[in-house]
Image: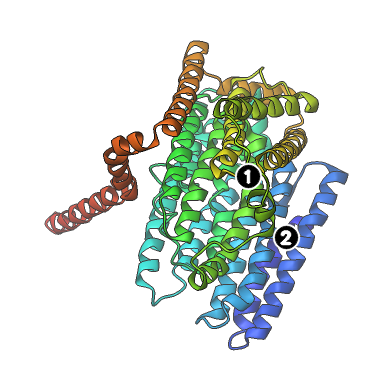
Amino acid sequence: MLAYALLLLPLASTFLTYLFGRGEERRISSISLSVSFLTFLSSLFLLLSFIRYSSYEVSIWGFFTLRVDPLSVVMAIAVSGISLIVHKYSVRYMQDDEGYARFFSLLGLMTFSILLTVLAGDLLLLFTGWTAIGVILFFLLGHDVKNREAGRYAIWTFITQRLGDIFLFGAIVLLYREYGTFKFGELFERILSGDGEGLELVGLLIVLSAFAKSAQFPLHLWLPYTMGGPTPVSALMHAGIVNAGGFLINRFSPVFYHAEMGLHIAFWIGLATAILGSTLMLIQSDVKRALGYSTMGQMGYMIMECGLGAFALAIYHLIAHGIFKATLFMSSGSVIHNARKDPNIPEDEVYSFFVKRSLPATRVPWVVFALITVSVPLIVVVLAHSVAGVEIFKYQGAIILLFFGWITGAQTIFSIYKIGARSVYRLLFFTVLSFSVVVLGYVFLGHSFEKFLYPDKSFVKRIYENASIHPTLFELQVFLLALVVVAGWVFVYYANQRKEVLLERLKVISSFIYVHLYRELYMRELVSLVGSFLERFSLKLNKLMRWV
């Protein structure tokens, strides 16, 4: 009953808002907010129902089914919670825009489509919700019909989403032909008890569908260029839509019990996307586009986690990033407004206390700080996993995640050295303390999350093993990563000692790299070229077909 309510409430909001709220903005906001709040409450009650009855399925009209399991419950709470926040934010933000009722109707319909996707208990409902998300997103991004640029990139998004739908449809056809059922319960049971014949292609198609939805390279161009849509849409898109690729891979996790190729491809594409998205973010002058590339980088990291076999960690990352990025988008307007009034960085009491406080100048030797930067994050991360009882050195995926945690911590501590603060020891102490607290919390919550989503340890072990590569190739990969780190430290040391000489030598190279990155490696031009070719080809084909 609760699963029904969770789906029907946002759908009812869509029709009630459009039918009874036209011309009455106050009534529209009241209906929309009330139903959104009830939807969020229903998701919490669904969690209580799951705790009491464990996983179960609910039939719809005797054929379709809704599935209540750890993954669907967690995602339903996250989606309905973020949707409630976006609805509340939109009440005043969209007040002076045309199509107020239409916007809230589409917002309710989008919430319904996402919830239908996460609660679907069979392949057909999942595909319906997955496809509907892309269609409704097109209308939300093009909400301002006078903004031609927003409409143009909404079409880009629509085409990319349809490409992902084709891949998912292919996977569904292959699964039904091989196992003869659409229902997840029966399907997963047959997959786990079988030999997995033919699942490599299915796993590849699922991963490709996730790439299109989660803006993975080279299907990423639609994401940073959709900033012309309303800010609430950007918040919802970056918090609950673009990360759906991680959910899709988790939903079909039994497929990857037998399919290894899809996991390996997910790792490398995710890694490339994370690096490219983060790099492009650094050179953006537009706040919202920088956030768009930031999301691209984070989605690359999420897909990479799936490729490493850390499925539960990807969901944990998905939710944490969704909440964080929604907050950033909804506060971006204030940041832009304040920056226009005051182009300088405003004073911050916490920053001033740690960095600008007038204390006797202390200069930590470079070598000492380098040793602290390299050793402390590694010790903190390893100890945190040991305390939590996580076997971090047992699986290749865990070791790679350890590497990224180490690099992140090292970068955080090294930034203190670059600040050149007077009270460097004070700042270093509090930075290490906060980093330790964050890592401990992340490890404990992530480990508990994995137990909740995947209580079967043998299943988790098998997924990690499937994500592993040949030991020689893995050792070569670790060696190359270590070489990059060492080269980076040598470069930083050399730059610190001979800054002027190095800057002069690197001026030409850095300008060359910056120009090509600023043009986004010419991916936009390449897509436009392909689009023009397809347009000319279709016109010639139309003329040819007239004579057939």
Residue projecting furthest to the top: 472
On residue 6, which mark appears? 2
What is the x, y in percent for residue 259? 53, 25
On residue 422, which mark appears? 1
What is the x, y in percent for residue 89? 64, 70
Residue projecting furthest to the bottom: 23
Tell me if 380 is positioned left or right of 25 in this view.
right
SS under mark 2: helix
| Colour scheme | rainbow
Tell me if 177 is positioned left or right of 522 in this view.
right
What is the x, y in percent for residue 274? 48, 39
CA separation, marks 2 and 1?
55 Å
Residue projecting furthest to the front: 360
Residue visible at 48% across and 60% down in the picture: 287
Tell me if 441 is positioned left or right of 343 in this view.
right
Residue projecting furthest to the left: 547
Crowding near the residue tagged with mark 2, few <14, some 14–19, many ≥20 C-alpha atoms within 10 Å: many
Crowding near the residue tagged with mark 1, few <14, some 14–19, many ≥20 C-alpha atoms within 10 Å: some
Q: Nearer the viewer, residue 397 or 482?
A: 482
On residue 445, which mark appears? none
Q: Is residue 252 visible?
A: no
SS under mark 1: loop
Up-down relation of residue 110 to residue 183 (above or below): below
Of tags 2 and 1, the one toward the viewer is 1
What's the residue type where badge 1 is placed?
Answer: Arg
Upstream in sequence: badge 2 or badge 1: 2
